[in-house]
């Protein structure tokens, strides 16, 4: 009997999109009223269905709507997106998404994700240029010799640094840039591609899950919950330290097994293919010359400038893309590439990541179907009703799983915060826990599911590494179970101590 092959990430996402389209035929359509601050007129715009009206931008207006958020959170720009108004859920006429809407959703998703898609394609271009110069091969050979016998430092340093990026400024989508560079380094250290993927993706996931000062999650969520973001900071910091330690130990245990016996690798059957694709350093003939050192320095500076711009200057994908485009041109100039050769190499490199770009667009298309079918608010309404009358220990842990489930439909952390916090945070008052508990369950719930969430970044990351989703699940599920138990214990202790 022929073995059934696990579908590609593109097919998985299309199946999920089909499931969501079917849900729109059975889940009632509904919507909360929304409130958005308008800086130019210093007023609130209140939207009820299609009926829009202006309201005075005052604390009295907010209190009258049952929104316990200080006015300055809106006026200083902390909350810029429309927020849901508690108690205003209205069931609407169904908007089922049919055959045509299903096939239009990935197209709309690609259009809406054009910024990150372009970033990925430009990134592929500069990787192609770097591979042409031989700088990667030379640098990896040097690093492999330098770290010989101490390769485990790679795992500790990469995972920890990326976790720091995740907890401070939400390093997530940007990590796509790291895979093509780090995979050859980990292969040279006698690890497999799963180890490289784990260090980057798990590092980012645990960092954003336990965000301490991340403006895209903890700060915006705390603002939308009506509390200061420093409330609960110590607990989140301890959770971050504990989570990173668990993740590093888990990755190290697997990595050591693979290093000692390559047949223990979950992707051992792909070993030769991945090494050929990413370049095994064993056959490298490049020497790390002065010119190649300068090229590697420029390439590294692209990442340093990107991280500084995102964390300090408010940059996003447009600016990040420009950085890598300029970097590619400088590297091509230093490598003395002819114009035609540069263009062809750049386009070929971009083409290598075209499949990843499509995955990002299709994943966004799933959210498009949810928005068009008007079922997101219905799911949120039923989730908030479900927790009524629970004890605070049960309530806290149920909220953890509710947020995990909601993140399948709303993978954006900032989107989840502004949509759910005004509805969910008042529930904390009814069971006698602080609103920071809701902020924490939001972060931890989304973070736990992010390890496996097919509508998040994992499928795009797997496509770069050339690892199947089934192989990733086999590797990461035990870690997710360990982290879930750890998180539940921490949350339970938090509400009773």
Image (tube, rainbow, N blue to C red):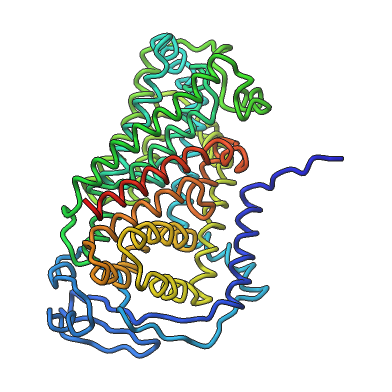
Relative height, residue 413 to residue 311 (above, below): below
Left or right relative to 420: residue 98: right
Q: Position of residue 327 (x, y in %)?
A: 37, 35
Q: Residue at x 25, y 55 (%)?
A: 495
Q: Position of residue 309 (x, y in %)?
A: 26, 44
Q: Residue at x 64, y 67 (%)?
A: 103
Relative height, residue 316 to residue 96 (above, below): above
Foreground residue, 494 or 382? 494
Count the marks: how many? Answer: 0
Left or right relative to 296: residue 440: left
Q: Position of residue 274 (x, y in %)?
A: 61, 27
Q: Quadrant of residue 220?
A: bottom left
Left or right relative to 76: residue 263: right
Q: Position of residue 442 (x, y in %)?
A: 34, 58
Foreground residue, 354 or 215? 215
Quarter of the image where the N terminus is located: top right
Q: Quadrant of residue 382?
A: bottom left
Foreground residue, 349 or 284? 284
Foreground residue, 428 or 352? 428
């Amino acid at each position: 009997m022929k073995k059934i092959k696990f579908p590609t990430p593109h097919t998985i996402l299309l199946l999920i999109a089909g499931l969501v389209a079917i849900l729109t035929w059975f889940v009632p359509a509904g919507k909360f009223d929304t409130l958005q601050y308008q800086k130019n007129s210093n007023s609130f715009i209140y939207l009820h269905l299609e009926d829009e009206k202006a309201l005075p931008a005052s604390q009295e207006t907010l209190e009258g709507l049952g929104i316990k958020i200080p006015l300055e959170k809106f006026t200083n720009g902390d909350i810029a997106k429309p927020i849901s108004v508690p108690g205003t859920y209205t069931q609407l006429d169904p908007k089922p998404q049919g055959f045509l809407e299903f096939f239009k959703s990935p197209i709309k998703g690609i259009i809406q994700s054009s910024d990150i898609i372009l970033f990925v394609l430009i990134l592929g271009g500069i990787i192609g240029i770097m591979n042409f110069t031989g700088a990667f091969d030379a640098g990896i050979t040097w690093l492999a010799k330098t770290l010989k016998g101490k390769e485990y430092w790679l795992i500790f340093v990469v995972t920890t640094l990326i976790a720091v990026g995740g907890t401070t400024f939400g390093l997530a989508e940007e990590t796509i840039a790291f895979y093509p560079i780090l995979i050859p380094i980990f292969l040279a250290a006698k690890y497999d591609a799963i180890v490289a993927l784990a260090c980057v993706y798990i590092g980012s996931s645990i960092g954003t899950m336990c965000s301490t000062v991340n403006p895209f999650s903890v700060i915006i969520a705390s603002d939308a919950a009506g509390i200061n973001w420093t409330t609960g900071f110590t607990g989140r910091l301890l959770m971050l330290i504990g989570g990173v330690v668990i993740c590093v130990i888990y990755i190290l245990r697997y990595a050591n097994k693979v290093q000692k016996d390559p047949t223990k690798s979950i992707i051992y059957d792909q070993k030769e293919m991945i090494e050929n694709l990413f370049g095994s350093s064993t056959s490298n003939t490049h020497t790390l010359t002065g010119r190649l050192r300068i090229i590697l320095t420029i390439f590294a500076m692209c990442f340093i400038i990107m991280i500084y711009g995102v964390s300090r200057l408010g940059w996003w994908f447009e600016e990040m893309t420009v950085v890598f485009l300029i970097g590619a041109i400088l590297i091509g100039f230093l490598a003395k590439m002819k114009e035609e050769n540069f263009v062809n190499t750049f386009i070929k490199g971009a083409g290598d990541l075209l499949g990843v770009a499509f995955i990002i667009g299709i994943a966004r298309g799933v959210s498009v179907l949810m928005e068009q079918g008007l079922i997101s608010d219905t799911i949120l309404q039923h989730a908030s009703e479900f927790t009524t009358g629970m004890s605070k220990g049960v309530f806290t842990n149920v909220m953890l799983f509710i947020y995990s489930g909601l993140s399948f439909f709303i993978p954006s952390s900032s989107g989840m915060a502004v949509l759910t916090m005004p509805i969910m945070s008042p529930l904390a008052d009814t069971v006698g826990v602080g609103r920071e508990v809701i902020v924490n369950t939001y972060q931890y719930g989304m973070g736990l599911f992010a390890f496996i969430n097919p509508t998040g970044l994992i499928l795009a990351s797997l496509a770069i590494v050339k690892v199947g989703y089934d192989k990733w699940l086999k590797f990461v599920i035990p870690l997710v179970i360990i982290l879930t138990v750890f998180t539940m214990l921490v949350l339970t202790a938090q509400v009773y101590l």
